Image (cartoon, helix red, strand yellow):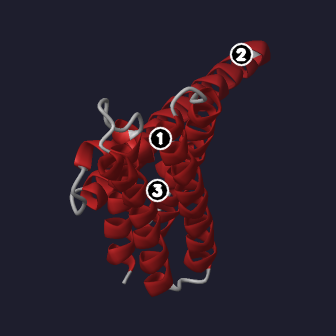
């Protein structure tokens, strides 16, 4: 008799424990799903203020920090993505210049672009420092300057009237779109 009482007590305890785990597991999954939805909603809402919505959403979601970020965090991510892309473009144009030994005009234009993208990356790195201290007007000025640096690179190819145009046109355009989105997100912080 006592052993059956113990058995039923253990069985009841086990049942209560399992029920609690199921309930809390469902509750936690539901809460996590809501967090995923709310981070996606914030990204979508934030990117709706930019000119290049799809690029904005893609670039922000490419960083796992976006899952828990507020608008300030999204601005940090947008800036990090812009810096990384600027650095990639600088490496690409440096590589192109090293291979453009046959065409002096092309080599000269690429040399100018190396300098312009070096300046652009420097501007964005300064913007990161300004964003940390919430100096938003400085952020906007520096990001705009980075966009101008990229445009200046492209203008050099137009002025030289190279038959094939700029080998950086697509990269420069994408860089400018990232920076434009960054400006729009920074404006939301004002």
Percent across and percent down for residue 112 are: 53, 53
Q: Residue at x 78, y 18 (%)?
A: 2
Task: Locate the C terminus and report the quarter of the image it occupies.
Answer: bottom left
Q: Which mark is residue 8?
A: none
Residue 189 seen anywhere in this rendered image of the structure: yes
Q: Which residue is mark 3?
A: 78
Percent across and percent down for residue 138 are: 49, 83
Q: Which residue is mark 1?
A: 105
Percent across and percent down for residue 16 are: 58, 31
124 above or below 158? below
Dot 1 crowding, Cα within 10 Å, few <14, some 14–19, many 20+: some
User: How far apart in space, not on screen, are marks 1 and 3 (Cα)?
Assistant: 35 Å
- Choose the circle earlier in sequence order: 2 or 3: 2
Q: Residue at x 75, y 21 (%)?
A: 6
- Choose the circle earlier in sequence order: 1 or 3: 3
Label 2 close to label 3 by CB (< 8 Å): no
Is disc 1 placed on a helix, strand or loop? helix
Which is more foreground, mark 2 or mark 3? 3
Q: Nearer the viewer, residue 123 or 73?
A: 123
Label 1 close to label 2 by CB (< 8 Å): no
User: How far apart in space, not on screen, are marks 2 and 3 (Cα)?
Assistant: 60 Å
Which is more foreground, mark 1 or mark 2? 1
Dot 3 crowding, Cα within 10 Å, few <14, some 14–19, many 20+: many
User: How far apart in space, not on screen, are marks 1 and 2 (Cα)?
Assistant: 90 Å
């Amino acid at each position: 008799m006592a052993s059956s009482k113990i058995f039923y007590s253990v069985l009841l305890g086990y049942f209560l424990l399992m029920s609690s785990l199921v309930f809390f597991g469902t509750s936690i999954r539901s809460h996590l799903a809501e967090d995923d939805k709310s981070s996606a909603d914030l990204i979508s809402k934030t990117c709706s203020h930019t000119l290049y919505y799809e690029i904005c959403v893609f670039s922000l979601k490419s960083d796992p920090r976006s899952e828990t970020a507020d608008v300030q965090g999204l601005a940090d991510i947008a800036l990090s993505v812009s810096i990384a892309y600027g650095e990639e473009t600088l490496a690409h144009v440096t590589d192109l210049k090293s291979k453009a030994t046959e065409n002096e005009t092309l080599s000269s234009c690429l040399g100018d672009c190396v300098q312009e993208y070096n300046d652009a990356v420097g501007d964005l790195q300064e913007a990161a420092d300004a964003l940390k201290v919430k100096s938003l007007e400085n952020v906007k000025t520096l990001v705009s300057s980075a966009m101008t640096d990229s445009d200046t690179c492209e203008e050099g190819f137009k002025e030289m009237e190279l038959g094939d145009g700029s080998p950086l046109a697509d990269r420069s355009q994408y860089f400018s779109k990232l920076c434009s989105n960054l400006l729009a997100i920074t404006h939301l912080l004002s």
